[in-house]
Image: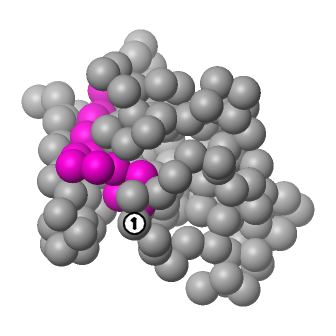
Amino acid sequence: AEFADLLDLARLRARAFALTPQPVDLRDVATGTAEALRPELADAGVTLELTVPDDPVVVEAVGDRLAQIAANLIENAGRHAILGVRVAVTAEGDRGVLTVDDDGPGIPGEETARVFDRLYTSARPTARTGPGTGLGLAIVRELARAMGGDAEAHDAPGGGARLVVHL
C-alpha cells in the first residue's frame, strides 16, 4: 500500500493522472464509502454517523478518486476517534462539501496547516493504530486540488478534528 500511495502522490504532483471529471453526486460517493467502512469502524468500537441532504449535491469529479478521498478521510478519523466519526455532505452555493469529524484529541493549532503535508505525522495521539502510510491526507489534498477543489483542517465543534474537502 505504501508504494502505491507514493506512486499516486508522485503522479498527482506531476499532474500525470488522467483525471476527467464528470458530474457525480457527492451523496452517493460518501454514502457508499461510509457504508463500506462502517463494519471496520464498528470492529474498533467506533460509530459512524452519516448526514446527507435530500437534494443531490453534484460536483465535477472522478468518482473512484472521490471515493478515495472519502475513504482516506474516514479511515484517518477512525484512527483518532474515541467513540465516533461524523460524515456530512452539504452544498455551499455551487460547491459540494464533504466534512469528516472525529471526537478524538483534536489537532494542535500550529499543526492544522500541516496535516495534509506529505509524510506528516501528527503529535496528536491516535486511539488505535491502522495501516496508515502517512500519505493518506496528502493524497486527499492533491486529489481535491487536481479536481479543482481543496482540503482544510479545523477543530470540530465539541472537540476533535474536522477535515473538510470543497469541490
Please tell me which residue is depicted at 40% across the width and 17% down the height of the picture.
92
Helix, strand or loop at label 1? It is loop
Furthest residue toward left: 54
Please tell me which residue is depicted at 21% across the width and 49% down the height of the picture.
83
Find residue 42 and report its image quarter: bottom left
Please state if 143 lies on the left or on the right of 94 as rendered.
Answer: right
As drawn, 60 above or below 66: above
State how many labels appear: 1
**Place of residue 50 in the rendered image (x, y in percent of width and height, measured from the top left):** 18, 43
As drawn, 20 above or below 59: below
Find residue 4 and report its image quarter: bottom right
**Range of magenta residues:** 78-91
Observer-nearest residue: 85 or 103?
A: 103
Furthest residue toward top: 93
**Place of residue 166 in the rendered image (x, y in percent of width and height, measured from the top left):** 52, 31
- Viewer can see residue 150: yes
Please, what is the three-letter code of the amino acid marked with disc 1? Arg
Please tell me which residue is depicted at 56% across the width and 35% down the height of the picture.
107
Q: How is the image coloured?
A: one colour
**Place of residue 34 in the rendered image (x, y in percent of width and height, measured from the top left):** 25, 58
As drawn, 58 above or below 127: above
Give the residue at mark 1: 128
Residue 81 part of the magenta segment: yes
Residue 144 part of the magenta segment: no
